[in-house]
Amino acid sequence: MADNTWMNSQITDSVTQTNVKVLGDAPAESMGMLYQMLAQSTGMSMQNMVANQQHKNSIDSAVVTGAVSLLYTLDVAAEGKSTQEILSGNPVAETMASLKGVLSSFRQENPNAPKFNT
């Protein structure tokens, strides 16, 4: 207890205990506020990630739809020409084509030769 002065000692003790309680509760309250703010910011970042993923999926669907539409509207001759252009510079494709030619000539010379899927 406080010493008796011109102020009542009970009032001095009451104010002192209130100050001690406020100072004692401050760290716990500040950590509680910190955890709430951390939870809120984490939740908002998760919501933003989900929204971005939904927007990306919408864009992907639009791209696929446009590509399929383009494929269905291509002319067959243009498709053959573009395929030939793609395969003409590819050494593996050229080797496969020459092997296919050799196999077909081998079949013409030997009709009893085993059949392979080409």
Image (spheres, grey):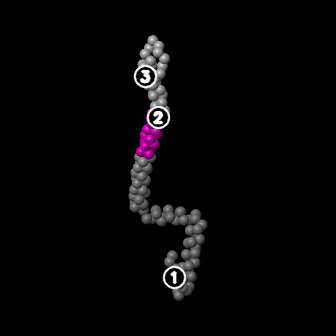
Say whether disc 1 or disc 2 marks the residue closer to the N-terminus. Answer: 2
Residue pointed to by mark 3: 14
The relative height of residue 98 versus residue 34 in the rendered view (above or below) is: below
Disc 3 element: helix
Whichever of callouts 2 and 3 sits on the residue coming sooner in the sequence is: 3
- Residue 28 tag number: 2
The residue to which callout 1 is attached is: 115
Q: Is residue 84 left or right of residue 57?
A: right
Query: In the rendered image, is residue 44 in sight?
Result: yes
Residue at the (45%, 12%) spot, across then down: 6
Q: CA distance from mark 1 to mark 2?
A: 83 Å
- Give residue 90's position: percent from left, percent from top: 58, 65
Tell me the quarter of the picture where residue 43 sits: top left
Rendered residue at 41%/49% (across/down): 54
Q: Residues within 10 Å of mark 3 (few under 14, many from 20)?
A: few
Residue 83: % across, % down: 50, 64
Amino acid on which disc 3 is placed: Ser
Look at the image and say whether residue 97 sits in the magenta stretch: no
C-alpha gap between disc 2 and disc 3: 22 Å
Per the rendered image, the range of residues in magenta is 28-48
- Image quarter of residue 41: top left
Q: Secondary structure at mark 2?
A: helix
Residue 38 colored magenta? yes
